[in-house]
Image: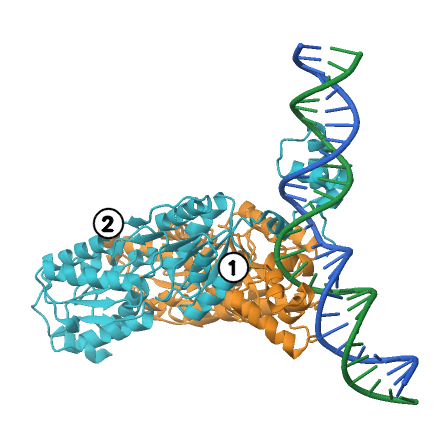
Chain colours: A cyan, B orange, C blue, D green
Amino acid sequence: MEAVTIKDVAALAGVSVGTASRVLSGNPATSADTRERVAAAAAELDYQPNAQAQALRSTRSTSLGLLVPDVRNPFFADLAHAAEQAALSAGYVTLLGNANEQGDQQDRYLDTLISRRVDGVIVAPVGDDGGRLRALIERKIPTVLVDRTVPGLDLPSVTTDSESGIRQAVQHLAELGHTRIGYISGPQATSTGRDRYAAFTRAVAEAGLSQDPELVYFGDYQAASGSAGVHALMQLASPPTALLAADSLMAVGAISILHKLGMRIGTDIALVAFDDIEWFALLNPALSVIAHSVEDMGRIAIDLLLQVINGQTPQSVVLPSELIVRASSATPITRTEPTTQPRQRSQQ
Amino acid sequence: MEAVTIKDVAALAGVSVGTASRVLSGNPATSADTRERVAAAAAELDYQPNAQAQALRSTRSTSLGLLVPDVRNPFFADLAHAAEQAALSAGYVTLLGNANEQGDQQDRYLDTLISRRVDGVIVAPVGDDGGRLRALIERKIPTVLVDRTVPGLDLPSVTTDSESGIRQAVQHLAELGHTRIGYISGPQATSTGRDRYAAFTRAVAEAGLSQDPELVYFGDYQAASGSAGVHALMQLASPPTALLAADSLMAVGAISILHKLGMRIGTDIALVAFDDIEWFALLNPALSVIAHSVEDMGRIAIDLLLQVINGQTPQSVVLPSELIVRASSATPITRTEPTTQPRQRSQQ
DNA sequence: CGATTCCATGGAAACGATTCCACGAGGATC
DNA sequence: GATCCTCGTGGAATCGTTTCCATGGAATCG
């Protein structure tokens, strides 16, 4: 509306707009006297530069895009928080977009980010085909993938090495006496879904446990599929005695239905979840998790992105994962009282 | 970089930039023939308009700012999601900012939003003094408050009527036989903190329960203060038999320390939390909550904001709250075995 | 058939900042 | 004391779009 522009500041300070601009952008070619007058005028008028005009002229918007599959997923909420804070301290604002686990919504946001000429983009990609991500690459817009990768797209990324954590979890369960571990997998259309599934099958083979394919349920990283997975696995002729869920939301779904089934987590069945969500430690029993630092992931993603923006070509980073044992998988298996199960089940 | 501009589109279509602009912005004063040629050229070049230039010229940025105290708080994550989706379907992108519960960080973001010339702002304010919110008002930038209000700022808002839910909760607990209800309050520097505290004291008085001021602990809406509150309340000579936490994070803190103290929620002590977080239903025992629709809150906030943008002056909206009873407060009080408490406590 | 209206179009100004170029004054150098 | 630099400054071009104004051809009317 009646916004105050640099012209007003210049007029009040009695200098030209060029000079005012120089002072305000810290250009040293200014005298102490004018510097002071311009600064005073800007403060007096509560001048806020028009970021759009700046961006248009200087082709730098000092803003980044961050696209996540779902903010309501605590893992991505934490990631968004971490990335946003890191970006802020580097002088960038973050435009947060929500793909809602839908490829077309992700594409729509990517186009918006292109239009807004963000200086760089961090994406936890939803689909497996790249979609409009290719438009970013064509335009040479600095882009970093986070958490997930996309086959065929050569972009720097920050991901987690699922292998180590999953191997630890399987070994841990094996040591407790479990031989049939149910695996609630992520979708095979995501890199993390594939990686973790592969890691699980390898770990199970190495530990000499049952490789029965029926013990694997393929979910979609949403809570409902965690419930469905438990439901399916528990109806097997020989159901698993331990469960491993490939992400936090599916673990939530699993917990929910286990309660309904009247199965006590930690005693009737062991449960381990991928993703270390703060809340998991508060459950009763506390949940064993495969932890990876989402804090680091966000920070490093921003770091890589800033490198790309500066014209460098950084190496991708793979973060470690590690098992944290809590009560949900602490009890050695006891085959003494399978009688409780039918009773409890009837509660449902 | 080598971005394609409307000039390129116009050249390829063999028209002037003015005409190209008219076609692309849906101006009817164009012939079917040129419309087609320009559209084809734009598609051919994968043209994405420069949003900054558009905003600069048209003084509309089709973007909104959303400022929340903390994205990691599931309540605000849900709010952000709801608002973002509603904004998106109205054709606006949302710039999400995180105040981190700090007034200065909120102010910094507000200045950024002013600079970026967003068309409107939705704020869940952090402090009690308004801070740079006043700058928004001076500039007549459409602004809507959500969840919390600020005394002395006359802005449309969407808030929750805490009164009804809290009254229901207190009556419910009274009916179970509780006479001493501990209240873990929000900070009195927030409107919700004050409102809920006032509602609690009124409800307790009406129900004829103990109004012992020692039963109220003033927290800060963070998990740690929930723990501290429980700790303090349980050390009273005559500790409460039921607890009411004024938000979800403090409830989380309370649950955490109750576990550590070896107190069984729902039997040793009743617990009710404000905010209906999905996860609370999954806890064991499931948590009784005072629910209010964060979905509606986000949607309505956008709705009000769009009205303000269109020059109207909408009425503030107050949403209802309502008690949902679950296992954490389902058991009538039993004064039979206070002996378990010392035993359990020594576990700590 | 000439005058008026209409409509699609081209050209140019404008949005608010940055940045390049030129200029003039003052100081340093010979 | 004349020349050359240096340095601070003003003016103008520029970024990519929208929008206003003028123009010219077609269509309509009397």
Q: Nearer the viewer, residue B134 or B228?
A: B134
Residue B260 appears in view: yes
Q: Residues within 10 Å of mark 1 (few under 14, many from 20)?
A: many
Q: Secondary structure at mark 1?
A: helix
In the depicted structure, whether residue A302 falls above or below residue A110: above
Q: Which mark is residue A341?
A: none
Residue position marked by numbered label 2 in the rendering: B346
Could you say where residue A25 lies in the image, as x and y percent from the top left? 62, 39
Q: For mark 2, give the secondary structure.
A: helix
Q: Is residue A333 left or right of residue B333?
A: left
Q: At x 23% / y 78%, what residue is drawn?
A: A347
The amino acid type of the residue labelled 1 equals: Ile
Vertically, is A336 above or below B69?
Answer: below
Q: Percent x, y for residue B69?
A: 50, 54
Specify few, some or many for label 2: CA neighbours under 10 Å numbering under 14, 14-19, or 20 or more: few
Closer to the camera, D10 or B152? D10
Determine whether, in the image, residue A302 is placed left or right of residue B261.
Answer: right
Write down the residue under mark 1: A114
Query: Marks 2 and 1, Cα distance to the nearest angstrom?
Result: 60 Å
Left/right of residue A252 with respect to residue B86 in the rendered view: left
Q: Amino acid at mark 2?
A: Ser
